Amino acid sequence: MKKFALAIALMFTVLASQAQTKTTPAVTEDKTDEQEGLAKTYLSQIMGVALSATSNMKLFHFVYDWIGTPYHFGGESRKGIDCSAFTKELYSEVFNLDIKRSSRDIFSMVNPVGKDDLKEGDLVFFKIHSRRISHVGIYLGDGKFAHASSRGVAISSLDDNYYSRYFYKGGRLLASFKDQLTNSNVATNTDDDNSN
């Protein structure tokens, strides 16, 4: 009789734990959705960009983390960074793509797009006091872009008189470069795996 009572008690314990397991992920998903919604609202207010359900939160978190980093020509770290190094670092961390280092070389990797056709994550190029491309940033939406300027890493508006005057073109990474970069990353990772 004791064995029978013990078996029934054990069965109820298993059923109760399964019921709890099934309800727990729903609560976690709700909390995750709520936290992401709060993060989007917070970043929208700080950056002045309306974040949508499809917004790349990794992009906005990356930019937020780097805001205020000082500008240093040729710099590639948190101690100081220039516009092309910031763009290269962002593309590496957010999109897992290793792009070229200078703004002119980066422009050679894109398909030019007009200002009105820019999408989140596209690149924006400027010819500031030069006939050649001299500055690059990353488009965030709502006419805003992130870049390493003389004030440090900041968010600026394409409608600002200064940037509007020097804006050259927008650019979207060519599919052929994306494929090439993705394939080279896969090959490198495979080589790394084989070397173990």
Image (cartoon, grey):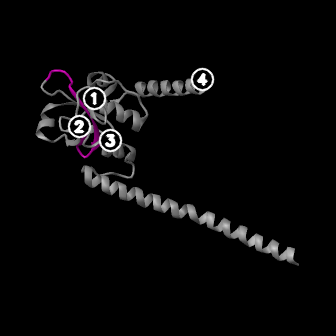
CA gap, disc 1 to disc 2? 9 Å
What kind of residue is marked 3?
Glu
Instruction: Pick out the residue farthest to the bottom.
Output: 1
Q: Is residue 72 above or below residue 29?
A: above
Q: Residue at x 18, y 38 (%)?
A: 151
Q: Is residue 146 magenta?
A: yes
> What range of the chain is rendered magenta?
130-148
**Sooner in the amino-acid sequence: mark 1 or mark 2:** 2
Q: Is residue 182 magenta?
A: no
Q: Taking 72 as reference, is 164 left or right?
A: left
Q: Residue 125, percent across and down?
A: 23, 30
Q: Where does label 1 land, which residue?
A: 75
Element marked by disc 4: loop
Assess whether mark 1 and mark 4 are in contact (beta carbons under 8 angstroms): no
Mark 2: few/some/many CA within 10 Å (<14, 14-19, 20+): many
Q: Where does label 4 land, which residue?
A: 195
Assess whether mark 4 and mark 3 are in contact (beta carbons under 8 angstroms): no
- Marks 3, 4: nearer the viewer: 4
What kind of residue is marked 4?
Ser
Q: Where does label 3 land, which residue?
A: 120
